[in-house]
Image (cartoon, rainbow, N blue to C red):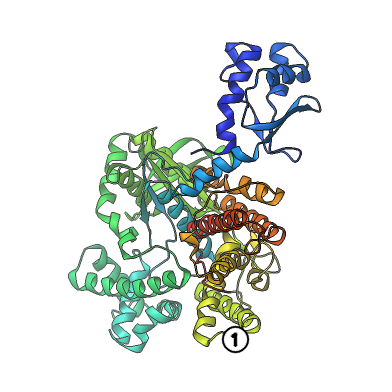
Amino acid sequence: MVSPLVALTPKVQSAIAAALGDDFREADPVLRPSQFADVQVNAALALAKKVGMPPRDVASKIVAALDLHGVCDKVEVSGPGFINLTFTDSWLAGLLQDVEADERTGVALEPAQNIPIDYSAPNVAKEMHVGHLRTTVVGDSIARTLEHLGHQVIRQNHIGDWGTPFGMLIEHLLEVGEGSDEAGLLVTDPNAFYQSARVKFDTAEKAEPAGSAGDFNVRARSRVVSLQAGDPETLRLWNELVDLSKVYFNKLYSTLGVTLTDLHLAGESMYNDALPGICAELESSGIAEVSEGALCVFLDGYTGREGKPVPLIIRKSDGGYGYATTDLATIKYRVHDLGAHRVLYVIGAPQSLHLNMVWDTARKAGWLPDDVVPVHVQIGNVLGDDRKILKTRSGKPLRLMALLEEAVEKAQAVIDETRPELDDETRATIARQIGIGAVKYADLSVAHDSEYVFDLDRMVALTGNTGPYLQYVVARIRSIFRQIGNEPLDQHAPLLVREAYERALAMHLLGFGDVVAEVGATYEPHRLAAYLFELAQTFSAFYENCPVLKADLDEAKESRLTLCALVFRVMTTGLDLLGLESPEQM
């Protein structure tokens, strides 16, 4: 099963070889969409200089050698040497019938690879804020897409569950009491719990006289030592903090509709035991050296101001470990224990320098072979109306759960106005589906490394390039089939491609497999979002101009119903890969 461009490629290459010689058999035919035909062959312009002929003459020789009987009913040379090809209706219909008969709607399975994906990564005892939205949503869409392509995706939620703050958090938990309402804030309002502990710590730091054994800050520091030493009671309390945070994480992930679960947690603490060995191996091999009391790696090509080398600090002068040490242990584990072929890090763009230094160090140590590809899927910022990073009016990061709740409220207002005849429960379900879908689609419809302005009113609109607009196409097709007492997935009939709008829809549907494969190769979900938006527009034009239930002939009616059903299958699959639900009605 192939798309038109893939099917044409060997035919055009054979013609190029016949026209210009066998040396050109592997030449790129340079096939492109065209506003003047179904596809344009631009190879003549690229080959003209090599063969010493005018491009138009080269194009004419290629056309003379082309065998497109049954494939094209119009072949012409235009402009300086473009070859315009218009497909026959029957050939297009045949290709589309193959897609219709395929349970994967034209998406080919790829040779399976092990692909760990690092995304989301919130902190224990801290609320997820709008900064976590993009890594979570983009990472989840990439994971879904790679799985659909046949890969073994290993989700890695690298939560912040270790470090010096846990001393004060454990002491605060002991003071408020396990099982208390205050402890329950870890589930409902993690920031409030964290800030209470922080205030106690900072107040004790400033108190006079300092240093008495009863001071909260002294006990917090002592608790860090106990935690790092593996004290059983301290570890029990630490586990309680983590478990309470898991409840919060899972509630948010469930609301957001992402596939992360407890099974995917791979926090910083997981690598604790490996850190001394990481340092010892790097030092013994001469890759790391002690500089001003800290163990550092100095890599060629990484310099700061005045040309001074930038160190990757893997053990601090006080003997503690930092992010670099943990990240080195992480890449080593993902390659050697998880058997990774590719490793994706869906994290903020500012982490680029750090990640590259970690990867180069790992390569030098032999932990990251040349045939394993680490990829930084860079995440840009979400902006407010002032084009600054989105925050509350008080200047604090915007709580992600609050943002999602507001989106559902906005969607509820739209649905209450447009569908007052539906019962409350149905309207609430639709509001959740389109509210959450609106937020996710707005994020996924722009390049992941770019910034965008967060505008809820625009996001929940039922028109324009929005999630609800795409979801509405699915709901509309369900409605068509409800009128005839059938289901879209049960509709199968011979496809006819006769009208211009049928033809445009067929051409677009044939590109679905290529787009999904492209997203899997580039890690850019916005390409799928753009494809689905164009599909929605193309379907709307088809539906407005080609009667479906009132078609003149039964064969045309059945064909158009089958086209609708295929749009439904492609759209619901595509929305699922983006992480959006497909409402029953809207």
Q: Is residue 228 left or right of residue 46?
A: left
- Location of residue 297 in the rendering, given as x and y in whole percent from the top left corner: 40, 40
334 to 409, vertically: above or below:
above
- Location of residue 9 in the rendering, given as x and y in whole percent from the top left corner: 58, 28
x 44%, y 64%: residue: 258
206 to 43, vertically: above or below:
below
- Location of residue 92 in the rendering, given as x and y in whole percent from the top left corner: 60, 41
Q: Is residue 295 left or right of residue 57?
A: left
Quarter of the image for the C terminus: give it.
bottom right
Residue 481 visible here:
yes
373 to 195, vertically: above or below:
above
x 33%, y 63%: residue: 162
Residue beneath disc 1: 421
Q: Is residue 239 left or right of residue 77?
A: left
- Amino acid, disc 1: Glu
The quarter holding residue 542 reads bottom right
Report helix, strand or loop for mark 1: loop
